[in-house]
Image: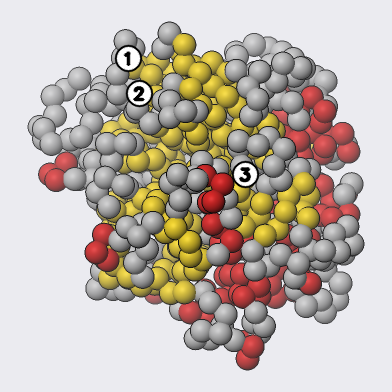
Amino acid sequence: EKARANGASAFSFPEVEAGVDANHHVAEGYNADVLLRWGDALFPDSPAFDPAKQTAEAQRRQFGYNNDYVGFIPLEGSSTHGLLVVNHEYTNPHLMFPGIVKIVDGKISQDKLSKEQVDVEMAAHGGTIVEIRKVDGKWQVVPEGIHNRRITSTTEMQLTGPVAGHDRVKTSADTTGTRVIGTLNNCAGGVTPWGTYIMAEENFHGYFSGDLPEGHKEAANYKRYGVPEGSYEWGNYYDRFDLSKEPNEPNRFGWIVEVDVMDPTATPKKRTALGRTKHEGAASIVSKDGRVVFYLGDDERFDYVYKFVTSGTLNATDRAANLDLLDEGTLYVAKFAEDGTFQWLPLVFGQGPLTAENGFASQADVLIETRRAADMLGATKMDRPEDIEPNAVNGKVYVMLTNNSKRKADQVDAANPRAENAFGHIIEITEEGGDFAATSGKWEVLLKCGDPTVAEVGATFSTETSKNGWFGMPDNCAVDSAGRLWVSTDGNSNKATGRTDGLWAVDTEGDARATSRLFFRVPVGAELCGPLFAPDDETAFVAVQHPGDGGDDWAGHGRPSYYEDLSTRWPDFKDDMPVRPSVLAITKIGGGKIGV
Ligand code: FEO
Ligand code: CA
Ligand code: CA
Ligand code: CA
């Protein structure tokens, strides 16, 4: 490793060489061990994974597809024994089901999915709660763990908070407007200070198809959320995903879901007080006065940054007393001013424009149409807000803004300073008085991302950042217990630049600020999710999502691939095994804190 000219960096590890190939790479001196792959057993009775004979029944007992958020809930305060909670965001049928992609007359075509395949997809979505333990320095799954659970797109859930029971969430299957079947597109998430698991519902629009009845009252609402987008085939077999048959069903998705992991029979709750958006995640922190603050990104071009502050305060000695904290509080949306200040604007029925004259009859309407309410308040239209992470050590908050190629030159503002923002940026927030529950504060751009050697990109990585250290498209992030920022990306995998997504360590303090270095990179076609540090900082969990997607053309995911002709067989590298999204546990050889 070349000695760093600037000794102020908070990180010390030999940087990984950027590149692209069939495998993952971690910094020298570290192990990256596969902990959980799609199809792995979670229970003593889980069937062995057989890609040629997949069933929904088996999938409901196995680790799901496309792992995204990773959280760790310690058991008895341990850093080496706890519950790993993992979201399964979406499915890639072209990578999952052998033989469905073909070339017909020189064109790529994909077979219509059977009902059985759709059922496998539904069972591969959702989340996993699984006990894990570190034994002799290696993490292992505990299939007998009494808390182990799969949550899927068919798990019954309860709607709670101001929207529960409202007419706009009633359907023919649920005339109470309180019981929803399943959760969709759980991207990032969170673990609350009282030890529950948060699953954010993000791109729910893709699961709906069909046409709303002519003149239906939800038409404008659904248009604002891009419903229906119809990239899934579930509506062919399940009426609830067909708008012509169940027009209110989309109002039951786009929420923050809370799961009490200590009771494997507990009904997950959709906490409507936190608003309805394409929720990226919900990282949280306790404010000075004990209220709990959740930071929420709405991942769409020109959508907003939100936060939710509970009305009640955390009860540190009685866990049960916190279990409905998320039903009462204030949802705010951010307005960033040109002078480096910002305000949190409350989304409260009856305040400002959120009144009957503007079509809001109650707080339920404000929450169902969170985006329209935020539009009316004049919030700042951002470049796709992804993960937002508070930092308990330095009191700041980091906002990942992944990219926005559609921002025009006359639409730039101080908080979104680049037109055609292909590479994204990171904003650092300082709440007024260092109080996370404050309603105003200051902000600055920490980093404009992209290749700093290409002048027109306008990236602002420090000059200490090497050719491996720059990145674009920040998506997920983590703050370790030393307060250091780690950023993972979605969109760098590109044949032309010869790079992939990965995990970068980003300095935020002193002379080293905006210095970045590559710690881990993914196999071809993948993006990197997680990341998450164990409480002792001796393990970094990372989630490799959609490995191999894109086949020979890996410039971005969502491209056709062929089960028979994958560009990688990661992580098994066996001919009879497809690529498998997997969670890895990264540890230092010989033990110790990561990146120190
Ligand atoms: Fe699922 Fe916003 O990434
Ligand atoms: Ca994400
Ligand atoms: Ca995070
Ligand atoms: Ca992503």
Front of the two marks 3 and 2: 3
Query: Mark 1 and mark 2: span between their CA atoms?
Result: 7 Å
Q: On the image, numbered disc 2 is attached to which residue?
A: 538
Residue 445 location (% of width, % of height): 28, 58
Residue at image mark 3 = 259
Colour setup of the view: secondary structure
Query: Disc 1 marks which residue?
Result: 591
The residue sitting at 87% across, 49% down in the picture is 238
Say which of 253 and 426 sits in front: 253
**Amino acid at the residue labelled 3:** Val
Which residue is more in the foreground, 422 or 587?
Answer: 587
Where is 513 relative to 250, above or below?
above
The answer to whether any part of residue 189 appears in the image is yes
Determine the secondary structure under disc 3.
strand
Where residue 122 sits: x, y (%)? Answer: 77, 39
- Residue contact at pointers 3 and 2, CB within 8 angstroms: no
Q: Quick one: which residue is furthest to the bottom in this view?
A: 357
Q: Residue at x 38, y 31 (%)?
A: 535
Q: Residue at x 82, y 47 (%)?
A: 234
